[in-house]
Image (cartoon, helix red, strand yellow):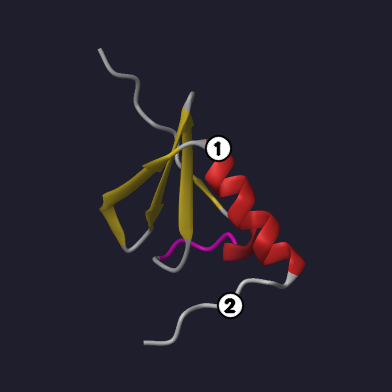
């Protein structure tokens, strides 16, 4: 039987109940990410790409593409 994921919100979400944050669940060796307002849509990845993204964001080098 598959283990239920335990979702965690960012501490930057303000701790309020609501639909304005990204949630993460770990089920080694994968990470699952979802947006709280669309919990049925889940992105699954491994820790390395997420760690790289967080390093780039923290360094100030992240520049979103403009459509």
* Vertical order, 33 against 20 (above or below): above
Provide residue 5's location: percent of width, then percent of height: 39, 31
The foreground one among 22 and 52 is 52
Q: Residue at x 59, y 56 (%)?
A: 53
Q: Classify mark 2: residues with Cα within 10 Å, few (<14), some (14-19) or many (20+).
A: few
| Label 2 SS | loop
What number is the disc on residue 47?
Answer: 1
Q: Earlier in the sequence, mark 2 or mark 1?
A: 1
What number is the disc on residue 63?
Answer: 2
What number is the disc on residue 19?
Answer: none
Provide residue 1's location: percent of width, then percent of height: 25, 12
Quarter of the image where one finds residue 66: bottom left
Q: Classify mark 1: residues with Cα within 10 Å, few (<14), some (14-19) or many (20+).
A: some
Q: Residue at x 26, y 52 (%)?
A: 41
Distance from label 2 to label 1 (Cα)? 21 Å
Residue situated furthest right in the rendering? 59
The foreground one among 52 and 1 is 52
Does the residue at mark 2 contact the one at mark 1 (Cβ under 8 Å)? no
Q: Which residues are magenta?
A: 14-18
Residue 42 located within the stretch drawn in magenta: no
């Amino acid at each position: 039987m598959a283990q239920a994921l335990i979702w965690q919100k960012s501490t930057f979400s303000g701790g309020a109940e609501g639909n304005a944050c990204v949630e993460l669940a770990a089920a080694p060796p994968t990470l699952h990410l979802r947006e709280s307002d669309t919990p049925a849509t889940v992105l699954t990845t491994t820790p390395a790409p997420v760690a790289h993204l967080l390093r780039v964001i923290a360094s100030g080098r992240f520049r979103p593409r403009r459509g």
